[in-house]
Image (cartoon, rainbow, N blue to C red):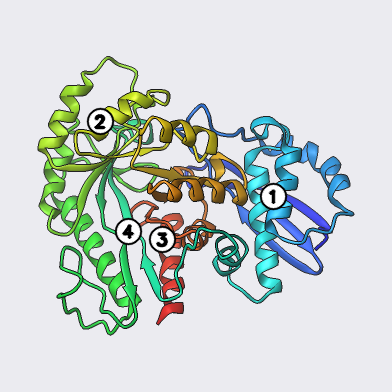
Amino acid sequence: MKIEDIKINKILDSRGMWTIEVEILSEGIREKASIPSGKSRGSYEAKNLEYEDILKNLKEFLKKIQDINFNGSKEFDNFLIENAGENKKELGANFTLGLSIAFSRILAKKENLELWQYLKKEYADQDELKTIQREKFYMPGLMINVIGGGVHSNNNLDFQEYWLTTDKRELQNGLTPPRMGADFKTDKCGYNNDLRGYFDDVLNKILNAIKKLEEKLPKPLGKNDEGAFCTNFSDNYQPFVFLLEFKNDFELGADIAANQITKLVNWKRIYDKLKVLDVKYLEDPFKEDEFENFAKLRKEGFKVIGDDLTVTNVERLKIALEKNSVDGVIVKPNQVGTILETFEFVKLAKENNLFTIFSHRSGETNDHWLIDLGIAFDTDFFKIGPPLQGERVAKYNRLREILEKFL
């Protein structure tokens, strides 16, 4: 397919900051994609450009692209990678990702497919990585940052996110999905394999936990960039004391975001305390180049997750694999700039038995393409914030909409 026109729109994200929406016209089909932005960024993330700089480059880019007939998403993304320069500095990872998603939406519409269906067909089904087996459907787990700190919040917490997490569930061949915390083989829920019913049950548990926290957390109580509760606590550990009430339904986790912590701390003492508090998942527990410390912490029984460490970048992930640094990885497509590169990162992670977490950014939009990518590439978890604010709710509603396909 040939691209006839590209437009760049300047829009606001959920933090009231400017970001971009990319619009493509091809063979009479017009599609858009809006791109989020992060406040807590690893230094190895691909480079984003400002709207004005992208606009300056657009005319020249259209000249390069106007006579090329692209046969699929992979071919188009390879073109973007070749022309974006090192670390996407020539075009901007925000622009290339918007192009990648918008063009994939056009290709999906041409085949009368949903975006996730097209991506599964274009990437997963043609690769050794079979992301959704025909006889099974996997309901991804959720990592919900219900209490916030760090650079996302105006409070005294050093840790950036405090999570309640649910596990990934396998639903297949008429098996009834279990309630959280129950045995898969014996639990009788009465959903008759209604995935929406199961998902609604999960959401109700999350909303109930949020309601109880709102009543019990120290006042005054506000919200941070991602919709998580924001208030002052006695120390960095007190939020987990409140979350322990929900241990029957959820595991506990945290994004330490160590890159953002500049004061001197005793990391051993911190993780000894978190172990006592029964915290299972830890994202970025050390700074972005401390691969060996990540590896040591895994031996303490935590599930260690890389974000600033790996930044959805295959080369960074190879180092983490060589040093046995992580159990799982955060996947943020705007850290790398194309769907193709996101897929290659996920593929390498899965080939090495790491779990993947498709994640929002602090500055989000109402676009929900993240859910389609996660479903297409069989993510183990979504981290999309609490289901309260519009830009986060849009992701939950899209996930529920996709589940309807499996009824």
Q: Is residue 218 visible?
A: no
Residue for badge 2: 297
Disc number lying in front (1 or 3): 1
Residue for badge 4: 141
Which amino acid is tagged 2?
A: Leu
Q: Residue at x 65, y 69 (%)?
A: 108
Q: Earlier in the sequence, mark 2 or mark 1?
A: 1
Horizontal placement of 307 versus 22: left or right?
left
Residue for badge 1: 77
Q: Earlier in the sequence, mark 3 or mark 4?
A: 4
Instruction: Please determine whether, in this image, residue 65 is positioned above or below residue 376.
Output: above
Q: Secondary structure at mark 1?
A: helix
Cα separation, mark 3 vs mark 4, equals 16 Å
| Residue found farthest to the top | 264
Q: Secondary structure at mark 2?
A: helix
Q: Residue at x 25, y 70 (%)?
A: 201
Cα separation, mark 1 vs mark 4, equals 29 Å
Q: Earlier in the sequence, mark 1 or mark 4?
A: 1
Residue for badge 3: 393
Q: Are marks 1 and 3 in contact (CB under 8 Å)?
A: no
Cα separation, mark 4 vs mark 2, equals 23 Å
Task: Answer few, some or many: residues within 10 Å of disc 3's Cα (few below 14, many 20 plus, some between 14 and 19).
Answer: some
Q: Are marks 4 and 2 in contact (CB under 8 Å)?
A: no
Disc number lying in front (2 or 3): 2
Which amino acid is tagged 4?
A: Gly
